[in-house]
Amino acid sequence: MKTKVTELLQIEYPIIQGGMAWVAEHHLAAAVSEAGGFGLIGAASAPPEIVREEIRKAKELTDKPFGVNIMLLNPNADEVAKIVVEEGIQAVTTGAGNPEKYMPMWKEAGVKVIPVVASVAMAKRMERYGADAVVAEGMEAGGHIGNQTTMALIPQIVDAVNIPVIAAGGIGDGRGVAASFMLGAEGVQMGTRFVVADESIVHDNYKDRIVKAKDIDSVVTGQSTGHPVRCLRNQMTKEYIKKEQEGVPFEELERMTLGSLRKAVMDGDILNGTVMAGQIAGLVSKRQSCKEILQEIMTEAEKLLHC
Amino acid sequence: MLEEMKEMIAEQLNCEESSITETTSFKDDLGADSLDLFELVMALEEKYEVEIPSEELAELTTVGAVMEYLKNKGVEA
């Protein structure tokens, strides 16, 4: 399928893999790109030199283009922003903030810039500063989320900007891709479905938890603190939400989740760790390779879209 | 300028116009989050035909600070 997004990123399928902290490392990013999508290395809070290493390792696994997601709250964001230029990365996506100050440097180096946005005003502003596309992410997504749903947000952003819009949040199969395209998107970003991919290095317990998840397992912690995080319910979320309702101070709640994503992703402690996943986890029911995932999704989507 | 600003802020942040003064802080007094501030900045830029780069956004925490900023940018009071 050809869209403005496949053209922009020089890829076969208009599907981007989300830049998930701890999950989006070089194996997964390279596998997604190698299979015809666009893989991302999630820089998250990693030290800059680790990000550089991840980029180099991904390059050993694929000659196809891949990107880096930069979490702008990371105190090292300035350095990571320079590393992507030095390493000749094709595209960056940015989250948790405003990437304006890096745009001139990236544009000059020919790095495509795709900010993740959660509102119309932010999308318009990013367009004005030279963004090549935006990822519009609804609150169905896993991890840190906004307040608007994908269904409502995508058409509003599509109407507001002239650059391509990539839909994210709640997309896990060909129907989701087709629906996003009907809303005006020209690409999608998926996270949860790729977490369980064979090439993903996530602990088996974490993958099993997603594969077994039911629709109602998706909960949001931190609603009251203004830092909502979507994950799958377990011992930790039960305790967290109970404490939240009791009005426990923010700092104490934060302590509960410090390092808890790593605990779940790397150590496989899915009872006390944070199992971040989107609402679509209930639909994700099998483990496949990235290639199988992409081909299955695109075959279904193209059939639905009659293309 | 204050009256005009009060009207705009009240509309953007859905709050009482009468609760806004020069010392009102967007975050602390009006509960604005980062997305709200984006809305406000975009509205200000459009109305006063100025560009407010993001490095300068951090300092614009109160109504008075925004007015001062706009004046320095040559916006007529």
Image (spheres, coloured by chain):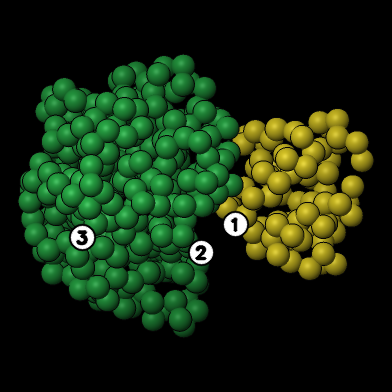
Chain colours: A green, B yellow
Q: Mark 3 highlights which residue?
A: A264
Q: Looking at the image, do the residues carrying marks 2 and 3 touch, with CB atoms under 8 Å apart?
A: no
What is the three-letter code of the residue carrying label 3? Answer: Ala
Q: Dividing the picture into quarters, in which one does residue A109 lie? A: top left
Q: In the image as oriented, which residue stretches furthest toward the front?
A: A306
Q: Is residue A243 above or below residue A43?
A: below
Find residue A297 and report its horizontal and vertical position in percent.
Answer: 17, 49
Find residue A134 and report its horizontal and vertical position in percent.
Answer: 44, 40
Total residue callouts: 3
Q: Mark 1 highlights which residue?
A: B33
Q: Earlier in the sequence, mark 2 or mark 3?
A: 2
Q: Nearer the viewer, residue B68 or A215?
A: A215
Q: For the C terminus of chain B, which image quadrant?
A: top right
What is the three-letter code of the residue carrying label 1? Answer: Asp
Q: Looking at the image, do the residues carrying marks 2 and 1 touch, with CB atoms under 8 Å apart?
A: yes
Q: Mark 2 highlights which residue?
A: A226
| C-alpha separation, residue under disc 2 versus residue under disc 3 | 23 Å
Q: Is residue B44 above or below residue B51?
A: below
Left or right side of A64 for A142: right
What is the three-letter code of the residue carrying label 2? Answer: Gly
Disc 1 is placed on an element classified as loop
Find residue A106 and report its horizontal and vertical position in percent.
Answer: 44, 23
Q: Is residue A118 above or below residue A67?
A: below
Q: Residue at x 70, y 57 (%)?
A: B12
Disc 3 is placed on an element classified as helix
